Image (cartoon, grey):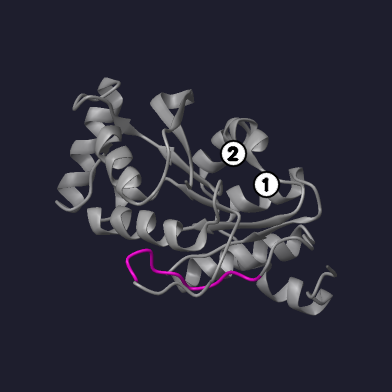
Amino acid sequence: MGNCWSDDKRDMIHDARKYAPAAARNRGPIYKVLRPHLLRQGLVLEVASGTGEHITHFAQASDPGLVFQPSDPDPSARDSIDAWSSVLALANVLPAIALDATSAEWPIASADVVLCINMIHIAPWAAAVGLLHGASRILPESGVLFLYGPFRRGGQHTAPSNETFDLELRRKNPAWGVRDIDEVISLATTNGFGSPIIEEMPANNLSVIMRRL
């Protein structure tokens, strides 16, 4: 796949890049856990790609035959994603698409892997429900759903910092908050996913890997 970006367009969109300090810190550890579950070829969809720093890092580190499809409902986020991809001249990252996880119809018919990093706690629970429904629709048998973020376990926060973060989120929006991993797994099971692999990550986060049955 060739690079479709011209030099002039790269120059115009450089300033659209956004930066998230947490992404710079955690993208390496996340990729280390994600890498064994990726194929040499195929399509990886990221839901809620944000600044684009995660997906472009993963694309750089992966086999060139593995194509990454970023998405975000926010136009400014999509501009940032495309800007990062352009600056890094990544031929295996497609232009970002508008995707609302809660929608009954996604603008993509199939993917081999679905990623979602740090979304479900800063969105209403309906976004988690939509994510699991949508991933179930587009993933093939044995397709991978990869989640990352803070979670409660057994109804309890895993660290005081996560409890504080949860309170801050709920003050901003009562529909937000750190989710219980058991509730997420139960939702995944009803949508046709198997038992999860759960990996503890830095800063009291978890990686959760599930395969479509």
Classed neighbour count for the residue bearing mark 1: other residues with Cα under 10 Å, few (<14), some (14–19), many (≥20)? some
| Residue 27 belongs to magenta span | no
Q: Quadrant of residue 168?
A: top left
Q: How much space separates mark 2 and mark 1, taking CA atoms?
A: 7 Å
Residue 143 position in % (x across, y down): 56, 49
Query: Is mark 2 in CB contact (under 8 Å) with mark 1?
Result: yes
Q: Amino acid at mark 2?
A: Arg
Q: Which mark is residue 134?
A: none
Determine the residue positioned at 54% across, 68% down: 78
Q: Quadrant of residue 104?
A: bottom left
In this view of the protein, which residue sits in the foreground, 117 or 67? Answer: 67
45 vs 95: above or below = above
Secondary structure mostly seen in magenta is loop
Residue 152 position in % (x across, y down): 27, 30
Q: Amino acid at mark 1?
A: His
Question: Which residue is under mark 1?
Answer: 57
Determine the residue positioned at 78% across, 74% down: 5
In this view of the protein, which residue sits in the foreground, 24 or 62? Answer: 62
38 vs 206: above or below = below
Q: Is residue 51 visible?
A: no
Determine the residue positioned at 52% across, 57% down: 139
Question: Which residue is under mark 2?
Answer: 27
- Local SS, label 2: helix
Query: Can you say which quadrant of the picture contains the N terminus?
Result: bottom right
100 vs 92: above or below = below
Determine the residue positioned at 17% across, 53% down: 175
Classed neighbour count for the residue bearing mark 2: other residues with Cα under 10 Å, few (<14), some (14–19), many (≥20)? some
Residue 15 position in % (x across, y down): 63, 66
Q: Quadrant of residue 86?
A: bottom right
Q: Is residue 197 visible?
A: yes
Q: Which residues are magenta?
A: 95-103
Q: Earlier in the sequence, mark 2 or mark 1?
A: 2
